[in-house]
Image (spheres, rainbow, N blue to C red):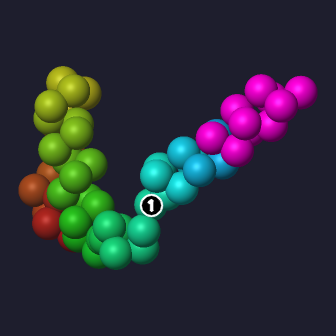
Amino acid sequence: MQDLREELCLDLTEQHDHEISVDELKILSEEELVDKAFQASFKGGNFTRDSSLSSEECSD
């Protein structure tokens, strides 16, 4: 029983090492999110050009 208590106490202290502070977070703008989505699409090879779209539709 004592070993179990010691192990639980160790687990509780280790959890604090993995906490994320708010200082490490970054709020992204919509433009930044769109850029990241395009980068992920190009990188993953999922980007396909829709030739049915006119240049006017793309500029909107």
Q: Which residue: 20% across, 47% down?
A: 38
- Residue 42 in the image: x percent, y percent? 14, 35
Q: Which residue is denoted by mark 1 in the rendering? A: 20
Left or right: where 19 falls relative to 9: left
Splitting the image into 4 quarters, where does residue 16 fall?
A: bottom right
- Residue 31 in the image: x percent, y percent? 23, 70
| Magenta segment boundaries in residue numbering | 1-10
Q: Amino acid at mark 1?
A: Ile
Is 47 covered by the magenta stretch?
no
Q: Is residue 30 visible?
A: no
Q: Work out whether 2 lies above or below 27.
A: above
9 vs 57, nearest the viewer: 9
> Which quarter of the image is occupied by the C terminus?
bottom left
Residue at disc 1, secondary structure? loop
Q: Which residue: 83% across, 31% down?
A: 2
Q: Which residue: 66% across, 48% down?
A: 12
